[in-house]
Amino acid sequence: MPQGLFQQGLDLFAHYVEVGGYVMPPLVAATLLLWFAIGYRALALRRGGVQPVRTLIDRQLKHPAETRTGIVEAAVGRGIGVYRRGTPSLRRALDDVFGEYDRDLKRFSLLIRIIVVAAPLLGLLGTVSGMIETFKSLEDMSLFSQSGGIAGGIAQALFTTQLGLAVAIPGLIIKGYLDKKQRTIQMELAQIKNILCTMAQRPQTPEVAA
């Protein structure tokens, strides 16, 4: 049964490629890349916990061995580690450590943006190609040629446009959501650095210094 479904999927894909023309393979590749990048960013942007940053810092100062499940919790843990080492230029040390998180937060963001912009253009390219096929059929009066004539050209034009939009619209919506989440986490990372630098200017209590 799974082999039958797999074969049906392959046949369906071959049919779509045949209907959509040469634009279909890059559109399918763009779709796969887009959803891979979205999945990666969704995992990378897990915050970890719902408490405010200040609460996370206080909690990890008291319980440093707690499990960290997201990027903000991990940043708090590493930031506290740098703070406890008593580094003279704490701000610079935190910038270096948090640079890794900044790179993770931005990874694949540009790729998603490029695909979201390019997918409708690829669809439009397929539309133009389909319309050219249609007009050639009209010119040759080959309404039912091997390539499908007018019907085949119109089908290609509409199908590639539809697929291009089907790739771009959800990608655009999810991209907006992930970008907003990225900005929120970047602000929280900056907040962690500010809090730790402020704490470093005050005398440490025995509990904090432990």
Image (cartoon, rainbow, N blue to C red):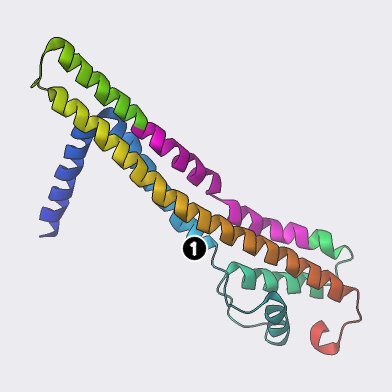
Q: Can residue 67 be seen in this view?
A: yes
135 displayed left or right of 56: left
Q: Nearer the viewer, residue 47 or 209?
A: 47
Q: Find disc 1 in the rendering and name its residue.
A: 43
In the depicted structure, whether residue 172 falls above or below residue 49: above
Snapshot quadrant of residue 21: top left
Q: Which amino acid does label 1 sit on?
A: Leu
103 displayed left or right of 130: right
- Tell me the quarter of the image containing the C terminus: bottom right
Among all residues in the image, which is located at the extreme left?
144
Among all residues in the image, which is located at the extreme top?
140
Residue at coordinates 51% horizontally, 44% vertically from top-left?
113
Find numbered disc 1 in the image and state the secondary structure of the residue it sits on.
Answer: helix
Q: Where is residue 16 in the image (x, y as percent from the top left)?
A: 21, 39
Q: Is residue 210 visible?
A: no
203 displayed left or right of 149: right
Q: Where is residue 146 in the image (x, y as percent from the top left)?
A: 10, 22
Residue at coordinates 82% horizontally, 58% vertically from top-left?
92
* Disc 1 crowd, CA 10 A, few/some/many (<14, 14-19, 20+): few
Q: How many numbered marks have been drawn onto this rendered protein structure?
A: 1
175 displayed left or right of 207: left
- Tell me the quarter of the image containing the N terminus: bottom left
Is residue 198 magenta-colored?
no
Snapshot quadrant of residue 205: bottom right
Is residue 101 magenta-colored?
yes
In the depicted structure, whether residue 175 falls above or below residue 85: above
> What secondary structure is the stretch in magenta mostly built from?
helix
In the depicted structure, whether residue 72 falls above or below residue 143: below
The span picked out in magenta is 94-123
